Amino acid sequence: MGQFDMVKDFFLGMSRSRVALLGAMVVTVVTPLLVGYMLVDTLWHVQNPYFGAAVYLVLGPVFLGGLALIFIGSFFFRGEREVHLFTLEYLRKYFTEPEMFGRLRRNVFLIVLLTSINITVFSLFLYRAYHYMESTSFCGQFCHTVMNPEFTAYQNGPHSRVTCVECHIGAGADWFVKSKISGARQLVAVVADTYPRPIATPVHGLRPARDTCEKCHRPELFHGDKLKVTNRFLDDEQNSEVHDVLLMKVGSAGDRAQSSHGIHWHIAPENRITYRATDHSRMVIPEVRLTGKDGREIVFRTPDADKLLAEAAAKAEEREMDCIDCHNRPSHVYLEVEDALDRQIMEGAIPRELPFIKRQALAAVTVKYPSSEAARTGISENLTRWYQQNQADVIKARPELLARAIAGTQTAYAQNVFPEMNIGWGTYVKQIGHGPDFNIGCFRCHDDRHKSADGRTISADCNTCHTMLAMEEPNPPILKTLRGE
Ligand code: HEC
Ligand code: HEC
Ligand code: HEC
Ligand code: HEC
Ligand code: HEC
């Protein structure tokens, strides 16, 4: 055995084991593919999530499996001339017998070279695979049908340049590991087709907003109020434009000014608000607890709090209020039906010149369609039929108006409704505000029904959160003043 050197022994050992040979073949085939793709991806950032999955989730593990086979094969080889590679005895010989040590030295260069190639490929692989799994295209597009709604709503939101992981995982190894464990569970649910449609919200394992949102936003440094001007269109023949003008008392979470006030008062360090909801959706909140700077507690409860909380029992969770209790749709912005159409009209995608288009588009998008495809054709047929029957002259003179209106209406629908995932208008409720019925969002607490022991209530006064400067006015004087007209 002594006349062979280590490298030769290695190849000899390998050639005598079928397992190791198989491993060698796998590695030989996979390595160029893997290295080639990783170079291309490093240089040009491949966007296609399926190429990435094929390489990082399939080829990568196959490559590692091939390497493992080589070592297992060589290690367990028991042929007529056993090589005993990697045993202590074998290695000891190399280091104790001078002649063999000399051979080892001559081969050191080769061994170091091979090992460093392996380590380089391996680290490049880990690095690229990590980036791939953190990429927006992997999170948003890999499980296409499942994530399509979230991904679409994300692209139309203000955070479309913020990656999914910046909000959903954030920095640090512990959350990275947690996310991969829950990711694996989700992958199983997708493969087994057991995932909920729509995906449940709120997200219960979500990282506390203080660790994620506050990496970029600092409400303690906000101050002053914010003007909110809304353009809306009515359902009359002219699709008349009206405006709401609100002065939002955004306020501050009080940092240097030391005085928190207004809407962001809730998240100031000196105030701690916890609440108990009757179920996981957090829609009904019978009890709110406010702990001030001096540690004094005020509990606000609705008249039926005892009954509701007893019925809810185990499902009633205690939660500390943070950004997400108001900003639950910072990124996945599903518009309400009127807002979605108003936006298309405002952007000119749906032409305002077309008589009654607001009313008719509303009628066309609120039909329940079985699939996105059916919705596309349904909206087109619905509008075409109505305009042919009722506004034939208009669309004959300017057929392009109807074509644009159809396209804009289809967009409004496609960006917000996803029949494949059972997501209709208003499935995902926005908690910032209160909706037209004053029963969601802020009004889960601010309904004047939550009373403390000394009779204080959480205010529903219309001027607590905003001052209303104009409501549905075509030409509000306040806007003229603001614009200096
Ligand atoms: C600006 C921060 C932010 C970004 C960026 C972001 N999300 Fe979210 N995501 C949230 C918040 C907040 C929620 C809802 C939390 C709640 O109500 O509990 C959420 C909820 C979800 C949900 C649950 C369903 C729902 O709509 O409530 C899924 C799935 C999801 N996000 C996937 C993604 C994917 C995929 C991306 C990237 C394409 C992404 N998110 C990017 C903040 C973000
Ligand atoms: C990586 C940085 C980053 C993170 C993390 C982040 N945001 Fe933002 N956010 C931004 C930027 C940049 C904008 C401005 C976008 C623009 O003006 O188009 C923005 C805008 C906003 C706005 C104003 C939206 C509007 O319509 O004007 C709100 C509200 C907001 N973010 C809340 C949140 C919340 C809540 C979270 C945590 C769930 C969060 N952000 C996480 C960077 C971030
Ligand atoms: C009590 C509900 C509530 C909480 C809690 C809350 N916000 Fe807000 N935030 C609002 C409202 C309401 C607005 C004004 C929205 C509008 O323009 O209609 C706002 C506005 C903002 C804006 C835009 C400010 C601007 O001037 O355009 C950002 C950014 C923001 N919030 C971030 C945060 C972050 C980060 C947190 C958590 C640390 C947080 N908010 C907690 C209700 C809340
Ligand atoms: C979980 C319950 C809860 C929710 C949800 C909630 N609030 Fe509050 N809010 C409170 C409590 C409690 C107070 C303090 C009442 C008191 O001290 O009299 C308060 C006080 C306020 C104040 C007065 C702050 C000051 O300057 O003293 C404003 C403004 C306000 N909330 C706005 C909002 C807005 C806007 C929303 C929705 C986007 C909202 N709140 C949602 C619990 C809530
Ligand atoms: C606890 C805080 C709070 C109280 C109390 C409150 N609102 Fe609001 N309201 C909001 C917030 C926050 C929004 C903005 C929602 C958004 O950004 O989409 C809003 C939006 C509105 C809008 C819609 C404006 C638009 O075009 O988007 C109207 C109308 C309105 N409020 C009327 C009222 C009236 C009337 C009352 C009194 C019965 C009232 N609000 C009480 C917080 C409040």
Image: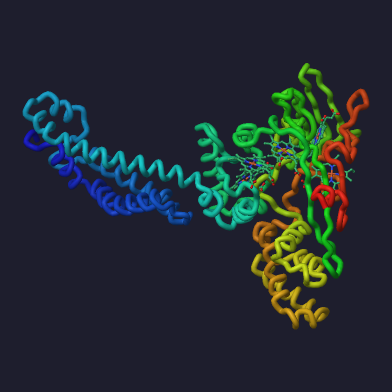
Q: Is the residue 343 above or below the residue 302 in the image?
A: below
Give 277 or 189, whichever is nearer the viewer.
277
Residue at left 74%, top 77%? Answer: 384
Give 360 or 445, whichever is nearer the viewer.
360
Q: Is residue 183 left or right of residue 255?
A: left
Q: Is residue 324 something one can see in this rendering?
A: yes
Q: Residue furthest front?
A: 485
Q: Is residue 139 left or right of residue 455?
A: left
Q: Quadrant of the N terminus?
A: top left
Residue at left 17%, top 39%? Answer: 110
Q: Is residue 310 something one can see in this rendering?
A: no
Q: Quadrant of residue 9?
A: top left
Q: Is the residue 394 above or below the residue 250 in the image?
A: below
Where residue 403 appears, x then y in whole percent?
69, 74
Where residue 120 appears, x then y in whole percent?
31, 41
Q: Is residue 471 left or right of residue 354?
A: right
Residue at left 42%, top 54%? Answer: 54
Q: Quadrant of ligand 5?
A: top right
Give 287 or 165, whichever is nearer the viewer.
165
Residue at left 60%, top 34%? Answer: 215
